[in-house]
Image (cartoon, rainbow, N blue to C red):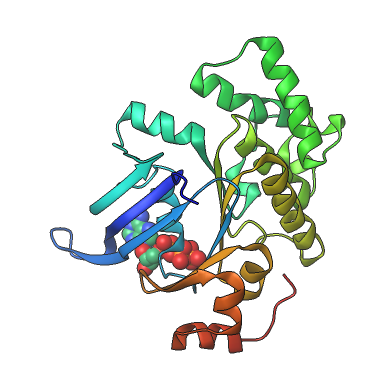
Amino acid sequence: MSRTAVIELDDVHVVHKARTGTLFRRDRVHAVNGVSLSVGKGETLGLVGESGCGKSTLARVMVGLQPVTSGRVLHQGVETKLNAAGRRRLGRSVSVVFQDPATALNPRMLVRDTLLDPFAVHGIGTRDEREARVEELLDLVGLPRSALDVLPRQISGGQRQRVAIARALTLNPDVIIADEPTSALDVSVRAQVLNLLMDLKEQLGLGLVFISHDINTVRFISDRMAVMLAGKIVETGPAEKVFTAPQHDYTRTLLSAVPSLL
Ligand SMILES: Nc1ncnc2c1ncn2[C@@H]1O[C@H](COP(=O)(O)OP(=O)(O)OP(=O)(O)O)[C@@H](O)[C@H]1O
């Protein structure tokens, strides 16, 4: 079966200027080093690797927030340019859920306004359409109507992450990039948020890129898995295969670490 990937990266490199070095000659960090991958609707790609291996930089590339140093980013088969129009197109189709909803959500915005915000940014929908969609979003993520008129700090961490997921869904994206979406949450609610993401993927036919340092969580949620080490993808394949028959030493090292509680 061949279908066009929603997002495809072709030999992408990102070199950051580090905060170290001198004013005139900053050190460089090769955060993403020749990564090629693709994700389509209806599948979950798990991206696993330790802290600092370049996962978040890669996530930012996929949503158009991070320019690449070299390589190509294709959206629906067409190379994207990170000008205003390209970014807007990508932003409608690919949205992101960050690790910590306490910092990702505007603390001074009511949940209702947070969910309405993407409509304003993209200038779409009538007032009635926007309001109806906000109610639909609450149902999708399992929040009560009473959650609309509160500030993020007035609800629990798990509920805040549900709001962040609802916001990511506002404009009906094709793909969601979830960057360590459960790491900042209490252990007791992590499984609920993971299950919600899996249900939404099924129900809406979404593509999901699930990023985590925890290989057990990635296995649980992913169809395909990519293992990242020092900016490179060192192993990729069906999640079950990578898990049961790892080919790379680094994957084996990750697998031998203590199992997590999600
Ligand atoms: N804006 C930036 N400027 C300079 N260096 C950066 C920048 N963003 C990331 N880096 C560096 O690039 C490397 C990869 O960072 P990145 O955040 O992508 O990794 P990560 O795997 O997501 O790690 P973590 O899980 O800790 O966020 C690190 O060495 C980091 O210090």
- Say which quarter of the image contains residue 193: bottom right
Height in image: 249 above or below 201? below
Quadrant for residue 219, please give it.
Answer: bottom right
Specify whether residue 18 is in view.
yes
Viewer-proximal residue among 198 and 58: 198
**As drawn, is 239 to the left or to the right of 153?**
left
Question: Residue 130, image x and y in percent?
Answer: 67, 18
Q: Residue at x 35, y 69 (%)?
A: 231
User: Does the rendering let one see residue 106?
Assistant: no
- Residue occupying image coordinates x 55% and y 39%: 174
> Residue 261: horizontal and vertical position, in percent?
75, 74
The correct choice, above or below, for 160 with respect to 185 in the image is above
Q: Quadrant of the C terminus?
A: bottom right
Left or right of 74 on screen, residue 111: right
- The residue furthest front is 1
Measured along the vertical axis of the image, is residue 19 above or below residue 2?
Answer: below
Instruction: Locate ligand 1 by image quadrant.
Output: bottom left
Left or right of 47? Residue 183 is: right
Position in image of residue 252 (x %, y %): 52, 87
Numbered marks: total? 0
